[in-house]
Image (cartoon, helix red, strand yellow):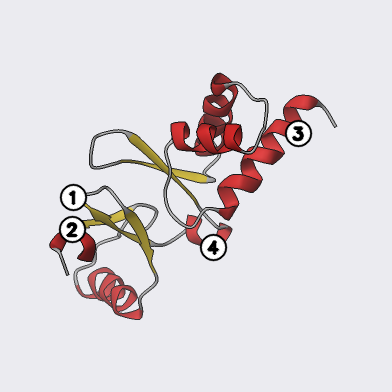
C-alpha cells in the first residue's frame, strides 16, 4: 500500500465517521490532533477528488465557506437536506411526506425533479432559540 493510498484511506475513514457536515480545515485539524502527519494540500486534493466522484456533497455554510458531507451510496440518488441559514448546519432528511410531495409533483404537475440536490433553507431549532 502506498503512502498516498494510506492517507486517502485514513481521510475516507474519518469522513465516513462524521455525522454532520465539515470543512476541509476542520478535517485537517482533526487529523493533526490524532497525530497524523499529512499536508493540508493533500487533504484538499483528496476532498476535491471525492467530491468530483460524487462521494461528498459540497455546500456553502452560513459564513459562505465550503462545507462537505459524506453521501452513503443510497443517498447519492435521491434525498433532501435542510440547511440552516443561521449556523450553516446541514441535515439529511428521510421523510415519507417529502417523498409523497415529490411523487405528487412528478405525477400531477408533470415535472421531473432533480432529486440529487434538494436543499430546503430555513432556520434550525437551535438558531430559533427553542
Classify 10 Å Cα crowding around label 3: few (below 14), some (14-19), many (20 and above): few
Q: Which residue is mark 3?
A: 6
Judged by depth in the image, the label closer to the viewer, 2 or 3, is 2
- Above or below, 42 against 130 in this view is above
Mark 2 touches mark 3? (CB < 8 Å) = no
Q: Which residue is mark 2?
A: 127
Identify the mark nearer the N-term, 4 or 1: 4
Classify 10 Å Cα crowding around label 4: few (below 14), some (14-19), many (20 and above): few
Residue 86: mark in rendering = 1
Residue drawn at (45%, 31%) of the image: 25
Q: What secondary structure is found at the residue carrying circle 3?
A: helix
Position of residue 18 measured from the top left corner of the image (x, y, whole percent): 52, 53
- Above or below, 32 against 105 in this view is above
Residue drawn at (71%, 40%) of the image: 9
Spatial separation of the CA atoms under disc 2 and disc 3 = 39 Å
Residue drawn at (59%, 31%) of the image: 32
Mark 1 touches mark 2? (CB < 8 Å) = yes
- Above or below, 59 against 48 in this view is below
Q: What secondary structure is found at the residue carrying circle 4?
A: helix
Identify the mark nearer the N-term, 3 or 4: 3
Judged by depth in the image, the label closer to the viewer, 3 or 4, is 3
Query: In front: 32, or 98?
Result: 32
Spatial separation of the CA atoms under disc 2 and disc 4 = 30 Å
Spatial separation of the CA atoms under disc 3 and disc 4 = 26 Å
Mark 3 touches mark 4? (CB < 8 Å) = no
Classify 10 Å Cα crowding around label 2: few (below 14), some (14-19), many (20 and above): few
Task: Determine the image quadrant of residue 112.
Answer: bottom left
Position of residue 29 measured from the top left corner of the image (x, y, whole percent): 51, 33
Q: Which residue is mark 4?
A: 74
Position of residue 48 measured from the top left corner of the image (x, y, whole percent): 51, 30
Classify 10 Å Cα crowding around label 1: few (below 14), some (14-19), many (20 and above): some
Amino acid at each position: 500500500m502506498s503512502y498516498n493510498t494510506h492517507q486517502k484511506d485514513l481521510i475516507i475513514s474519518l469522513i465516513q465517521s462524521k455525522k454532520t457536515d465539515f470543512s476541509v480545515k476542520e478535517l485537517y485539524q482533526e487529523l493533526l490532533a490524532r497525530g497524523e502527519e499529512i499536508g493540508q494540500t493533500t487533504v484538499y486534493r483528496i476532498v476535491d477528488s471525492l467530491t468530483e466522484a460524487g462521494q461528498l456533497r459540497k455546500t456553502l455554510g452560513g459564513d459562505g465557506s465550503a462545507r462537505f458531507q459524506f453521501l452513503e451510496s443510497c443517498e447519492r440518488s435521491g434525498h433532501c437536506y435542510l440547511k440552516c441559514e443561521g449556523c450553516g448546519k446541514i441535515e439529511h432528511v428521510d421523510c415519507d411526506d417529502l417523498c409523497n410531495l415529490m411523487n405528487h409533483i412528478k405525477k400531477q404537475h408533470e415535472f421531473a425533479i432533480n432529486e440529487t440536490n434538494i436543499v430546503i433553507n430555513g432556520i434550525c431549532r437551535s438558531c430559533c432559540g427553542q
